[in-house]
Image (tube, rainbow, N blue to C red):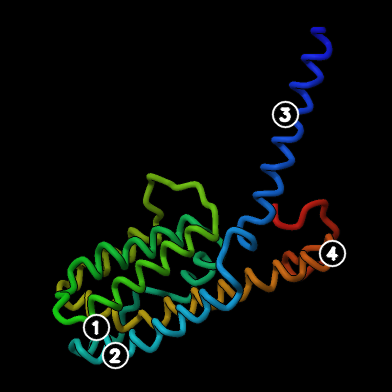
Amino acid sequence: MLVNCILRCGLLLVTLSLAIARHRQSSFSKSCYPRGTLSQAVDALHTKAAWLKATIPEDRIKNIRLLKKNTEKQFMKNCQFQEQLLSFFMEDVFGQLQLQGCKKIQFVEDFHSLRQRLSHCISCASSAREMKSITRIKRIYYGIGEKGIYKAISELDILLSWIKKFLESQHARISWCARGTYQITANKIHKVPNCLE
């Protein structure tokens, strides 16, 4: 009787483990939105960002960038950095933006919606500690005063292109994994037991 109970508990644990592993495997593909939905949302935000940029004074500080090339690599690989960067734009940039007019409010709502949808698609353990790159971005942003808003909004197209590139890389990885148990890492193809874990 005791052995039977132990075996049932063991079977239950194995079943739960498999269910969790399967959930992790499909965390981007199955629990996420249809393939083109997020890309379309990013495209729509690109158009709205161009309009938003036209409504504020031009960014005249050309020798400083918030979103540098090396920051893009971090954005592509680190989900905590993605979350912190999107939070920076929501809280620090849009939080200080004078939201007068329906189009500005709609843009911020759409950006917030995209951020929520991305976090729904990509499971990531949150970190209470701010990353060094985010601290650097905030230091520059607040260091140039109210012109920081103009700088951040002028670089929205950079951020949106990173998001689009990230989504494309995730979908390419998923479709590759669906074809077989192979994975591309560092330009090498190797066989793995579970592609998306």
Q: Which residue is mark 1?
A: 103
Which is more N-terminal, label 3 or label 1?
Answer: 3
Identify the residue shown where x is 70% and y is 35%: 16
Farthest residue in the front direction? 1
Q: How many angstroms separate mark 3 from mark 2 (CA)? A: 54 Å
Residue depicted at 61% across the width and 60% down the height: 28
Q: Amino acid at mark 1?
A: Lys
Residue sitting at 72 percent across and 29 percent down?
Answer: 13
Q: Is residue 74 above or below residue 36?
A: above
**Three-letter residue code for mark 3:** Leu
Q: Secondary structure at mark 1?
A: helix
Which kind of residue does numbered mark 4 sit on?
A: Gly
Q: Are marks 1 and 2 in contact (CB under 8 Å)?
A: yes
- Residue situated in front as seen by the camera: 41 or 156: 41
Name the quadrant of the N terminus.
top right
Q: Which residue is mark 4?
A: 180
Please tell me the numbered disc located at residue 13: 3
Nearest the camera: 104 or 190? Answer: 104
Q: Label 1 vs label 3: CA separation?
A: 51 Å
The local crowd at label 2, few if under 14, some if 14 to 19, many if 20 or more residues have their Cα within 10 Å, is some
- Earlier sequence position, callout 1 versus callout 4: 1
